[in-house]
Image (cartoon, helix red, strand yellow):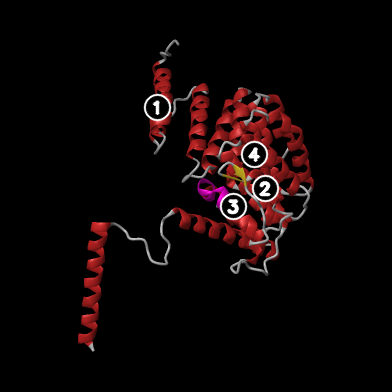
Amino acid sequence: FFGVRFEVLKDFAMSASAIVESVKENGIPEPKGGIALNGSNKHDLLVAELRKNVEVIDLAVGTKDSRLQSRVLRQTRIIRPKLTSAALGAVVKRTLSKEESSFFSKYLFENGVAMEMDTSTDKKSPDLSASMTTVPEVSAYLQLLCVAMLIDNKNLENAVEASTELIEFVSKFKSRTMDDIGSRAFFFYSRAHELTNNLAVIRPRLLTAYRTAVLRHDPTGQAMLLNLLLRNYIHYKLYDQADKLVQRTDFPETRSNNQLARFMYFDGRIKAIQLDYTDAFESLQQAMRKAPQGTALGFRIIVQKFMFIVQMLTGDIPDRATFRQQYMEKALAPYLELTKSVRVRRMPIC
């Protein structure tokens, strides 16, 4: 028995050695019937991932489990760089009816031509789950991805139109399962208008949406819309209006740390302009602590720059170690030189 086992292990080791040598000489072969890293399989993998997310959202709506839906929405950041019109169009055809897919026929393009959303052939696909019910949240999620793709592709005119249609669509529904998607829809709505320098136009709509979120006790929408309004005011240097908004509103307690970090950053900037440097520094410190440490490098760099300026305006000198933070040294180098000049009281004259 042990002799047979030894021979089997020996043959396996020789086979493994032969495979390693083959890979060294010829590279990694494409598997037969497996997943090869070519364009077609990347497309299929993306379609499968999107359809999986659609099924999870459908399940979350049915079970009223917001955690499942939040998990899918958090993956948007990962999906966006690899999202294509072909993949999104394939999921739309297999998931939505012809009436529901009319939105995508206007904004999805392939080789410069608008894609036809004819679902008659795809609905007969054997791999389609016939039992799955298309809920409004699924359509809103796919529209959200479409708007994000338009923004990433710099198709800003269509992004503005699509995001406007999206928030009109989500505003029709009052269900709690639409709150997370609705808040993200307003983010992309504001982002599209910001990139086209039309932020002032949407301010009344944001105020109306914020009032509605407060009346509906929607903390996710309140946090998002409050930050969007503060960003809108600060963009046009309307610091007095921004300060009045902060004083007359309460930031919701049940919110994500990301939204709290943004709010504290805006609050710190407002207080710094009003020469309230002590409170401004505390708010910026809170923003830095609440910001994601593994990601959001750009946000943390901006907050750190404002912290240096405010700290020096209070008469303190920033600790030299703060300039040596990982991945920040190059961006903070000019502020290190400024700190050195303040330390020796020799400011350069420009």
Magenta stretch: give its range: 79-88
Q: Name the residue under label 3.
A: 88
What amino acid is found at the position of numbered circle 2 in the picture? Ser
> Who comes first in sequence, dot 3 or dot 1?
3
> Who comes first in sequence, dot 4 or dot 3?
3
Residue at screen point 52% across, 23% down: 314
Q: Name the residue under label 1.
A: 333
Tell whether label 3 touches label 4 (CB within 8 Å). Answer: no
> Residue 65 in the image: x percent, y percent?
66, 62
> Who comes first in sequence, dot 4 or dot 1?
4
Task: Name the one closer to the observer, 122 or 312.
Answer: 122
Tell whether label 1 touches label 2 (CB within 8 Å). Answer: no
Pointer 3 local density, CA inside 10 Å: few below 14, some 14–19, many at least 20 = many
What amino acid is found at the position of numbered circle 4 in the picture? Ala
* Quadrant of the image containing the C terminus: top left
> Who comes first in sequence, dot 2 or dot 4?
2
Residue at screen point 43% across, 62% down: 35
Q: Mark 4 points at which residue?
A: 159
